Image (tube, helix red, strand yellow):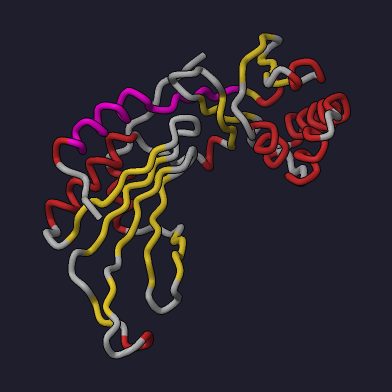
């Protein structure tokens, strides 16, 4: 597989730096929905309609402790009035009883659509520049690693940098002549950075959501994102 060249890396950096997600912290009580705005793919923020991305209502329902399959089923069946009543009721309950009445809205800077929602205390995302800087430092310090691919979803802002060890490693469990190249991915979701390692003993990608050296580096370079409303 052809690795990402230095020139391509800089082009990717430019594109990603221009496409940072933007955030806004607001009281959950400021959000409301009705059946008509849900049909149009919108929510109301202090009475003003704002577009939301695909899957947003599932995330909103999940944050309000509504089973995702229930939310998805009501949306698929066109039961928008019932879904709106349920969401508004649970939202009102949470605003009155939660120790953290605020939420963080995450938006796509290009489309101005809200793509995610979460509790401010759970938001750990860093800038795309920070993720790229960490990958660049790792590659600079480890000549046996190469950047194979960069996967980016412009709709959700999800980013994955996939690094591979160029040296083959013997894996006796698979046979005496079996050699593999193993690597890892630095992943940025809409709310947090993660790392995924290819572990030969399990024959699958194991997600490690713990405090790793990579994530510590990310947090050291943390840069707050700007408001969008």
Q: Quadrant of the N terminus?
A: bottom left
- At x 30% / y 27%, what residue is drawn? 15
**Residue at figure coordinates x 86%, y 29% from the top left:** 79
Rendering coords of residue 5 (x, y %)? 16, 43
Q: Which percent across, then down, holds residue 95?
A: 73, 29
**Of 223 and 129, the residue lying toward us:** 129
Q: What's drawn in magenta, residue-wise? A: 8-26
Q: Height in image: 95 above or below 125?
A: above
Q: Is residue 143 left or right of residue 220?
A: left
Q: Residue at x 37, y 63 (%)?
A: 197
What residue sits 71% from the left and 10% below the top?
47
Q: Residue furthest top?
A: 48
Residue that sits furthest to the bottom in the current view: 176
Question: Which of 118/19 is in front?
Answer: 19
Task: Tell me, yes or no, whether the highlighted magenta stretch contains residue 19.
Answer: yes
- The spot of residue 126 in percent (x, y) is 37, 37
Comparing 176 with 169, the one in front is 176
Residue 87 falls inside the magenta stretch: no
Residue 51 percent coordinates (x, y)? 61, 18
Relative to residue 225, is residue 168 depicted above or below?
A: below
Picture quadrant where residue 50 is located = top right
Quarter of the figure with residue 44: top right
Vertical placement of residue 148 versus 44, above or below: below
Tally of marks:
0
Q: Is residue 196 above or below residue 122?
A: below
């Amino acid at each position: 597989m052809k690795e990402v060249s230095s020139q391509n890396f800089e082009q990717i950096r430019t594109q990603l730096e221009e496409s940072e997600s933007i955030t806004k912290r607001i009281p959950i009580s400021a959000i409301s929905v009705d059946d008509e705005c849900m049909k149009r793919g919108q929510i109301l923020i202090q009475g003003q309609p704002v577009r939301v991305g695909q899957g947003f209502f599932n995330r909103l329902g999940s944050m309000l402790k509504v089973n995702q399959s229930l939310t998805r089923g009501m949306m698929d069946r066109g039961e928008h009035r019932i879904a709106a009543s349920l969401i508004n009721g649970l939202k009102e309950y949470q605003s009155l009883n939660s120790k953290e009445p605020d939420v963080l809205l995450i938006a796509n800077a290009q489309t101005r659509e809200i793509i995610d929602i979460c509790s401010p205390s759970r938001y750990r995302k860093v800038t795309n520049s920070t993720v790229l800087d960490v990958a660049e430092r790792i590659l600079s310090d480890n000549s046996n690693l190469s950047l194979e691919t960069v996967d980016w979803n412009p709709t959700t802002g999800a980013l994955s940098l996939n690094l591979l060890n160029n040296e083959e490693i013997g894996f006796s469990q698979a046979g005496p002549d079996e050699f593999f190249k193993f690597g890892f991915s630095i992943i940025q979701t809409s709310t947090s950075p993660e790392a995924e390692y290819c572990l030969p003993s399990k024959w699958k990608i194991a997600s490690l959501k713990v405090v790793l050296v990579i994530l510590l580096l990310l947090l050291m370079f943390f840069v707050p994102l700007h408001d969008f409303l």
